[in-house]
Amino acid sequence: MVSRRSPQLATREAARALYRIQSRYVETEQLAQRSLLIREKALGAEHPDVIPPLLTLSEAYAEQGRFADAEPLARRALGLAEKALGPEHPEVASALEPLAGLARIRGRYAEAEPLARRALAIREKALGPEHPDVAAVLAGLAELSILRQSAAQAEPLARRALAI
């Protein structure tokens, strides 16, 4: 199945993957800050095209262990996506996933699970149940179940992710 993600999202993910492989988080941070400033100045702070650099910057902070800096940016991206695109748009899932990951990393499992489950529902509806992006959310939910010491819940999630 061909991904229905926007070119902006694909570009953000490709850049993030490249920098993550190279562990160049400070450079990612600097580029994302510049992109964010340019987009806010040109389009306004509430424009949906501000979402990708917000998420990239949030992820750069998270990769540096700066979770307190990362979370407000991801929350802002989620709010913008919901307001501009609607609560079931795939970009909403793109903002929910890092928030779920941040909550999981910080040990806030009860907060992480509904965020991840909402991202899963959006991904399944938008992309279909067999899409690789669905598998990624399932794997995150399986990891969360393991952290919550619930192997019985983790196993079917992990098996489904693996099958995809």
Image (cartoon, helix red, strand yellow):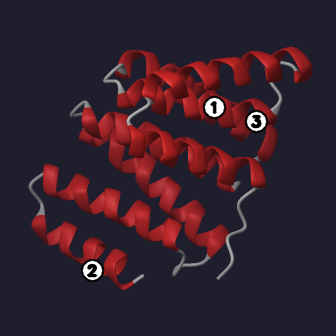
In the displayed structure, 125 sits above or below 69; it is below
Mark yes or no: residue 87 visible.
Answer: no
Q: How many marks?
A: 3
Q: Secondary structure at mark 1?
A: helix
The answer to whether residue 131 shows anywhere in this view is yes
Q: Which residue is mark 3?
A: 83
Q: CA distance from mark 1 to mark 2?
A: 31 Å
Give the distance between the C-alpha atoms of the residues marked 3 and 1, in whole angstroms. 10 Å
Q: Earlier in the sequence, mark 3 or mark 1?
A: 1
Q: Which mark is residue 159?
A: 2
98 left or right, relative to 112: right
Q: Earlier in the sequence, mark 3 or mark 2?
A: 3
Q: Residue at x 75, y 15 (%)?
A: 37
Tell me the residue at 53%/64% (across/down): 121
Can you identify the residue that label 1 sits on?
77
Q: Which one is in front in this view, the residue at disc 3 or the one at disc 2?
A: 2
Rendering coords of residue 137 (x, y %): 42, 60
Q: Earlier in the sequence, mark 1 or mark 2?
A: 1
Residue nearest the observer in this picture, 69 or 148: 69
Q: Position of residue 81 (x, y in %)?
A: 71, 39
Q: Residue furthest right?
A: 42
